[in-house]
């Protein structure tokens, strides 16, 4: 396994450079391919630099939660495929996979980008259950943003199954109705390394960071709303640094939203 020299990364940043020669506020190249899994209701493959993630959407009918009897259900899961990294192993979900799923879930759920009430079939009895499955195919850093983009792209690509006369999903043909989505929720991740804030940390930078902050944003009309935050690392952020990150999250979130559109 290749060891990351954190001090080397810090020395490069002190010279106002990054190890891959990007500007501090620049994302790696992003590519988005939708509809890659024919058996899913929606799917997408996203490449963020050399990080590669696939998201698939499956829909089924189930019972609503007791505290939201007239709303559909979203369940997000993430899997770190062992081939994606020497550090990933087969077995139960790792802590990193659980955190990725939670970050993606929170941005989608708290932004209310999906109208869950429109996923209700019969209050207290039947609702659509939306399963968002994320597979990490290659890890070169910033799995949070790659997974969030893939999940959102897959949701936008989703077509709801039709129901037969018994209110059961018709599985032998594709539906045509899109999900009730209003807006695009985007997560953007920033790393703090030796008091320098950088956007979209690659694997070497992720291994060297002192702290990270993932910010979820949603565009409503001309206004950008903050919908989620997730901090990692052992060092804190000053209020000035958080304000700077929020400003960058709004700007970078809009760039990524344009790609998804």
Image (spheres, grey):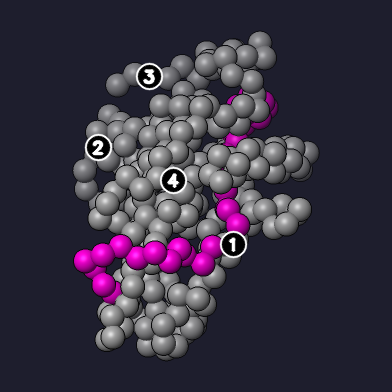
Residue 3's mark?
3
Residue 175: image quadrant is bottom left
Earlier residue among tags 4 and 1: 4
Q: Is residue 248 magenta?
A: no
Earlier residue among tags 3 and 1: 3
Q: Give the CA separation, mark 4 to mark 1.
A: 17 Å
Q: Give the CA separation, mark 3 to mark 2.
A: 18 Å
Q: Pointers 3 and 1 in contact (CB under 8 A)?
A: no
Q: Which quadrant, please, contains the N terminus?
A: top left
- Nearest to the eye among marks 4 and 2: give it: 4
Q: Which residue is mark 4?
A: 150
Q: Could you tell me which secondary element the residue under label 3 belongs to? A: loop
Q: Which residue is mark 2?
A: 82
Query: At 50% across and 20% down in the image, what residue appears?
Result: 6
Q: Pointers 4 and 1 in contact (CB under 8 A)?
A: no
Earlier residue among tags 4 and 2: 2
- Nearest to the eye among marks 3 and 4: give it: 4
* Image x and y of residue 210, in percent: 57, 32
Q: Give the CA separation, mark 3 to mark 4.
A: 29 Å
Q: Pointers 4 and 2 in contact (CB under 8 A)?
A: no
């Amino acid at each position: 396994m290749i060891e990351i020299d954190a001090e080397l990364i810090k020395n490069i940043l002190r010279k106002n450079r990054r190890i891959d020669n990007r500007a501090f506020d620049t994302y790696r190249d992003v590519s988005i391919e939708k509809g890659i899994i024919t058996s899913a209701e929606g799917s997408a493959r996203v490449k963020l630099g050399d990080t590669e993630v696939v998201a698939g959407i499956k829909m089924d009918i189930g019972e609503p939660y007791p505290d939201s009897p007239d709303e559909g259900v979203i369940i997000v899961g993430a899997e770190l495929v062992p081939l994606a990294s020497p550090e990933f192993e087969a077995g139960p979900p790792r802590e990193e996979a659980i955190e990725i799923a939670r970050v993606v879930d929170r941005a989608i759920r708290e932004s209310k980008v999906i109208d869950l009430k429109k996923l209700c079939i019969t209050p207290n009895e039947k609702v659509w259950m939306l399963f968002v499955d994320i597979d990490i195919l290659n890890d070169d850093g910033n799995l949070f943003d790659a997974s969030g983009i893939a999940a959102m792209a897959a949701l936008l690509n989703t077509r709801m199954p039709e129901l037969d006369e018994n209110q059961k999903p018709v599985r032998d043909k594709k539906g045509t109705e899109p999900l009730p989505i209003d807006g695009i929720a985007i997560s953007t991740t920033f790393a703090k390394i030796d008091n320098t804030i950088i956007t979209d940390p690659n694997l070497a930078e992720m291994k060297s960071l002192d702290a990270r902050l993932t910010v979820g944003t949603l565009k409503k009309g001309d206004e950008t709303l903050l919908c989620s935050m997730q901090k990692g690392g052992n060092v804190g952020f000053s209020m000035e640094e958080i304000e700077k990150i929020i400003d960058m999250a709004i700007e970078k979130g809009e760039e990524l939203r344009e790609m998804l559109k």
